[in-house]
Image: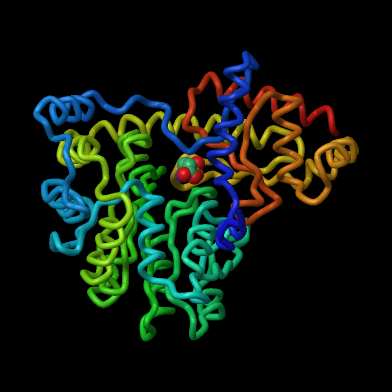
Amino acid sequence: MKLAERILKIKPSPTLAVTALANSLKARGIDVIGFGSGEPDFDTPRFIKDAAVRAIDSGKTKYTPAGGIPELKKAVADKFKRDNNLEYKISEVTINCGGKHSFYNLMQVLLDEGDEVIIPAPFWVSYPDIVLLADGNPVIIHSDEKDGFKVFPEQIKAAITSRTKAVVINSPSNPTGAAYTKDELRKIAETVADRDILLISDDIYESIIYDGLEFSNVANISEDIKKKTIVLNGVSKAYSMTGWRIGYMAGDEKIIKNVEMIQSQSTSNPTSISQWASVEALNGDQSVIGEMVSAFDRRRKIIVDGLNSIPGFSCLNPNGAFYAFPGIEKAASFKGWKTVSDKYGADSISSAMSSYLLEEARVAVVPGLPFGSDRHIRLSFATSDELIIEGLKRIKSAIEKLV
Ligand code: GLU
């Protein structure tokens, strides 16, 4: 049977694919170190798991309202007030099945065929494909490493057309870790001030931020900008709850209502048990976040220093999130590279490098190409110090063979 055209427009998520590949090699007894998945290696905190068990035991195992239980919506609104100084009514908040699903629902609500969404590169791999699934066109604008991987407002302005529906802001960024300051966000917001364009602030890495930097949200800039902003977030990264699949969003009531309508016709509701656990995550002891962030901070130093000591690699210090995004261009000019590109393909250096590292060093990394930069690879440092140190050692000796 001929499948729908839309399926031909997208690829499987490369972050999930690399993780699956590393896991399958491990299951076959091959000692692979995985830097693929953007998933904290910590267990979900005990008090959150206890809340889930209580939910099961007390029969909170049935359908919930499509847009989530009122208790969780309130916990989300309280979180926005407490952490971000943003006031939302309950009707301006909805709960989805993970951060990815929040973005997916939003694109389904916003886009007609040919509508455009401006996405700064490097970007999280799934944004463009989710836009394509909604028949929209991703419009990619490129940032430079020397500018700390941040785009300039002029670039956004130049990319705006009569079909532009939204601009995506992901700060701290997956994959670069770049975080915009409040002033930079203000200038970005000004580009859409007199236009009917939505700002999408994907704040999923909000709490993972280093060096005393303050997280800024574009919605804080003014009441007018807040009205033009949809904030996306979730419990996955902050509370190590990736598998629970709870994302949420806040903003314009009409958009939220339509997101819930789509959900009522697709997933019915996010899992009831996960929702009750998320109430506890958001209302409970927030010190669990700080404990994880200090471990990530320690690992950040290990990985950035280690990558910068590898010949031909150069890595910026990420402001937030838990990804290192080293440049590999120089390593791909070493004399041994010809054998690598002959073997793994000459059309993408980041894919050839990833394949080489998997086979030669038994280390799984994600190629930069699907993030919008073929000159980089991504390593998640949400894994143990020991594995990071051992993985870096392996990468270094594999690269030294090419020099
Ligand atoms: N967002 C994480 C990552 O980039 C999780 C996997 C995914 O959904 O892409 O690795």
- Asked where in the image residue 202 lies, by quadrant, the reply is bottom left
Residue 33: x %, y % from top left: 60, 24
Residue ID at (18%, 25%): 53
The outermost residue toward the left is 58
Residue ID at (21%, 35%): 273
Residue 52: x %, y % from top left: 20, 29
Residue 67: x %, y % from top left: 21, 54
Q: Quadrant of the C terminus?
A: top right
Residue 336: x %, y % from top left: 88, 35
The outermost residue toward the front is 1
Q: Is residue 100 left or right of residue 275?
A: right
Q: Is residue 128 left or right of residue 314?
A: left
- Say above or below: 89 vs 246: below
The outermost residue toward the top is 29
Q: How is the image coloured?
A: rainbow
Residue ID at (32%, 36%): 244
Q: Is residue 146 left or right of residue 361?
A: left
How many badges with numbers are in the image? 0
Residue ID at (42%, 55%): 171
- Asked where in the image residue 258 lies, by quadrant, the reply is bottom left
Residue situated in front as seen by the camera: 331 or 254: 254
Q: Is residue 246 left or right of residue 162?
A: left
- Say above or below: 396 vs 109: above
- Say above or below: 75 vs 200: above
